[in-house]
Image: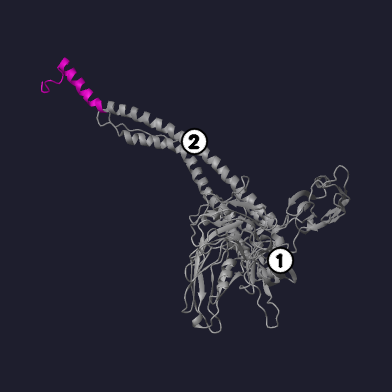
């Protein structure tokens, strides 16, 4: 530390000195001890900026490779098309779908069972009774019994919907009244709505209005009364019938009184059904033929037909006949049916028009039956499933771009800044570790393979396996009673020091023994002959080479430049994707493949893992920075206290200096008073 000299001037001048400047000079000298710390902190903060940027670049690169190694990622994406979207529309293709062309013929669509209850004039009428319904013969019957809380059509619909019967009920209202619609929640043949019991009635009654037509051509005037669910219902009221300009005849339900009214027909005591009314009309011979007809929905109506042709026989009918408690019968309008189709020549059925896995991994929607061709055959719809080459190319291209960004950022740290000073990470071991990780894993891959999977890892094994790694000596491992499981066999192989690492892994196929050579490239090639048998199931566990027929980046059209960056030949990549897509998938996704190994290398280099190269560098810097900041903070506290003390002491000294002239003057005056000195300067 340098020294600070203080100039107090003449002690008798009375001017003193500048305390602030003096203290500032001393403190500045004390602060010089922090300069190396501050410089180191600045350097570390510059490194942090570079490390953070590298972390982002490595993260981008990791995202690219993860997308390529993910079994559900971009290489699993499928494209699809239908040759006739009016008949069949492709909606999804999972990674399990295989690229290829399939032929589909749609004979018929699936239908969902539906129906309705007999319409009533007023949706607010009070209903009574109960209804028992279920979906399909295997469904559980649910009985809905009406009470004061749900005795309308809307209440009945809500009760059915909450019953768990699997039927959706809703109220439909049109010009003819209101009715309850029932739709099965299960499509196809097994989803038919079955009404096994029904005692629902409209307690407000229903007037059977007349609907008819005038004579037309050879068709006489005719019409019908509104239908009723039960032809045997006891009716009340009357009916007025006039043929042409003739006298209107009244038809009254009931016995004739003692003084019958003129032009009135009585059905008779106890005669109050549709059939009774028809019989009374026909017996009266009023020029009208009456009959009871059964409609297609099972209901019944009273039909009236004029016996006189032409306009002279036109019927004028007014009805006030009432069914006091009309039944609300169920009519099925659509019968549940399965879709019938042929896929690649195989006749199949689907309960739904949304068809899944009849082409493995593919979902499509049936919209209409296939059209009939000129030769009478049905149109064949071509469903084409393809690999998504476009997205695969885009992702691999992005990987190359992001890899080059990482390499360029690393290379940039090996020189000087524009001002001529070394880059923040110049000479740092972090740079060399990152370079070794990228270069070392870019072109190497350890040969590997696996035995056929078994479903139970604890199955007992027998037999032997011969393993040779590279040019090493082939060794045979025989299964004994102490190692007759997959885990035991793996342990035996690992302890034999063959140059191979054995692991037991579980995946979607089951549990299998995986072998990985300890040497990369061709020098670690595995030669394996398996005679292992799963004695529990009697299955031979064959050895499968885990490598892909694509073994390096060059085959994908990717080459390495002198500066470590990559160049992508898009034409070569497109060609290999078209000719060997499964090989590309294996290159990135097979167990211990290049893709899996490189993804692990990136994880060990970046910041996603606490032990990653960049993560450790950032952690080390952070620890050092914390120490430096603590030192600076502690030194600042000491300097601050010193500054306060110096200011007080030097202020006091300054005051003393400034007071000396006055004190000298006082002394002179006192001296003169005592001695008389200097009182007569001319004496």
Determine if the magenta segment contains residue 673.
yes
Reading the image, the residue beneath label 1 is 349
Residue 248 appearing in the image: yes
Q: Nearer the viewer, residue 309 or 62?
A: 309
Residue 475 appearing in the image: no
On the rendered structure, is 143 left or right of 548?
Answer: left
Label 2 close to label 1 by CB (< 8 Å): no
Quadrant of the frame with the C terminus: top left
- Figure check: 668 above or below 388: above
Residue, far top: 674
On the rendered structure, is 449 left or right of 228?
Answer: right
Magenta: main secondary structure:
helix
The stretch of residues the image draws in magenta is: 658-683
Residue, far front: 258
Quadrant of the frame with the N terminus: top left
**Residue 606 numbered mark, or none:** none
Reading the image, the residue beneath label 2 is 631
Of pointers 2 and 1, the one earlier in the residue sequence? 1
Crowd band around label 1 with a 10 angstrom C-alpha radius: few (<14), some (14–19), many (20+): many
Q: Please state which of the two labelled residues, at mark 2 or mark 1, is closer to the viewer.
A: 1
Q: Nearer the viewer, residue 365 or 77?
A: 365
């Amino acid at each position: 530390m340098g020294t600070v000299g203080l100039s107090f001037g003449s002690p008798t001048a009375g001017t003193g000195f500048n305390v602030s400047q003096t203290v500032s000079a001393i403190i500045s000298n004390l602060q010089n001890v922090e300069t190396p710390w501050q410089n180191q902190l600045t350097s570390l903060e510059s490194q942090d900026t570079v490390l953070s940027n590298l972390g982002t670049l490595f993260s981008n690169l990791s995202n690219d490779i993860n997308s390529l190694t993910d079994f559900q990622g971009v290489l699993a994406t499928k494209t699809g098309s239908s040759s006739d979207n009016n008949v069949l529309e492709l909606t999804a293709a999972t990674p399990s779908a295989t690229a290829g062309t399939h032929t589909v013929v749609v004979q018929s669509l699936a239908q969902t069972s539906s129906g309705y209850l007999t319409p009533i004039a007023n949706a607010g009428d009070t209903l009574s009774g109960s209804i028992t319904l279920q979906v399909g013969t295997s469904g559980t019957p649910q009985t809905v019994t009406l009470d004061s809380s749900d005795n309308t059509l809307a209440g009945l619909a809500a009760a059915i919907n909450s019953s768990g019967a699997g039927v959706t009920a809703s109220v439909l209202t049109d010009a003819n009244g209101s009715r309850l619609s029932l739709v099965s929640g299960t499509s196809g043949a097994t989803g038919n709505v079955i009404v096994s019991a029904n005692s629902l009635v409209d307690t407000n009654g229903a007037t059977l209005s007349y609907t008819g037509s005038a004579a037309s051509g050879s068709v006489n005037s005719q019409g019908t009364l509104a239908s009723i669910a039960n032809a045997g219902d006891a009716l009340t009221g009357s009916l007025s019938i006039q043929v042409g300009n003739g006298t209107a005849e009244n038809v009254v339900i009931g016995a004739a009184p003692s003084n019958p009214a003129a032009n009135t027909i009585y059905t008779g005591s106890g005669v109050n059904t549709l059939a009774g009314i028809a019989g009374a009309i026909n017996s009266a011979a009023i020029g009208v033929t009456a009959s009871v007809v059964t409609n297609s929905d099972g209901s019944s109506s009273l039909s009236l037909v004029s016996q006189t042709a032409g306009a002279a026989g036109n019927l004028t009918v007014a009805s006030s006949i009432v069914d006091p408690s009309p039944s609300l019968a169920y009519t099925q309008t659509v019968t549940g049916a399965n879709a019938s189709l042929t896929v690649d020549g195989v006749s199949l059925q689907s309960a739904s028009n949304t068809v899944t896995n009849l082409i493995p991994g593919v979902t499509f929607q049936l919209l209409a039956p296939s059209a009939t061709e000129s030769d009478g055959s049905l149109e064949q719809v071509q469903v084409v499933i393809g690999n998504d080459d476009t997205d695969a190319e885009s992702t691999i291209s992005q990987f190359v771009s992001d890899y080059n960004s990482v390499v360029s950022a690393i290379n940039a740290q090996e020189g000087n800044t524009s001002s001529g000073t070394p880059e923040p990470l110049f000479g740092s071991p972090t740079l060399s570790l990152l370079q070794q990780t990228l270069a070392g894993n870019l072109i190497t891959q350890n040969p590997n393979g696996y035995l056929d999977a078994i479903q139970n890892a604890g199955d007992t094994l027998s037999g032997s396996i011969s393993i040779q790694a590279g040019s090493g000596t082939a060794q045979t491992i025989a299964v004994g009673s102490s190692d007759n499981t997959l885990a035991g066999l793996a342990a035996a192989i690992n302890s034999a020091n063959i140059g191979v690492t054995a692991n037991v892994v579980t995946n979607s196929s089951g549990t299998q023994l995986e072998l990985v050579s300890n040497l990369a490239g061709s020098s670690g090639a595995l030669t394996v002959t398996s005679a292992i048998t799963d004695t529990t199931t009697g299955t031979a566990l064959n050895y499968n080479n885990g490598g892909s027929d694509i073994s390096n980046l060059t085959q994908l059209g990717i080459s390495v430049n002198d500066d470590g960056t990559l160049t992508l030949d898009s034409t070569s990549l497109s060609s290999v994707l078209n000719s060997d897509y499964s090989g590309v998938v294996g290159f990135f996704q097979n167990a211990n493949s290049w893709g899996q190994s490189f993804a692990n290398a990136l994880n060990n280099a970046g910041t996603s893992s606490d032990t990653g190269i960049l993560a450790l560098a950032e952690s080390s810097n952070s620890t050092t920075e914390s120490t430096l900041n603590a030192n600076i903070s502690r030194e600042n506290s000491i300097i601050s206290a010193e500054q306060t003390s110096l200011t007080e002491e030097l202020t006091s000294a300054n005051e003393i200096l400034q007071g000396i002239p006055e004190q000298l003057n006082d002394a002179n005056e006192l001296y003169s008073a005592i001695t008389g000195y200097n009182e007569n300067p001319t004496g």
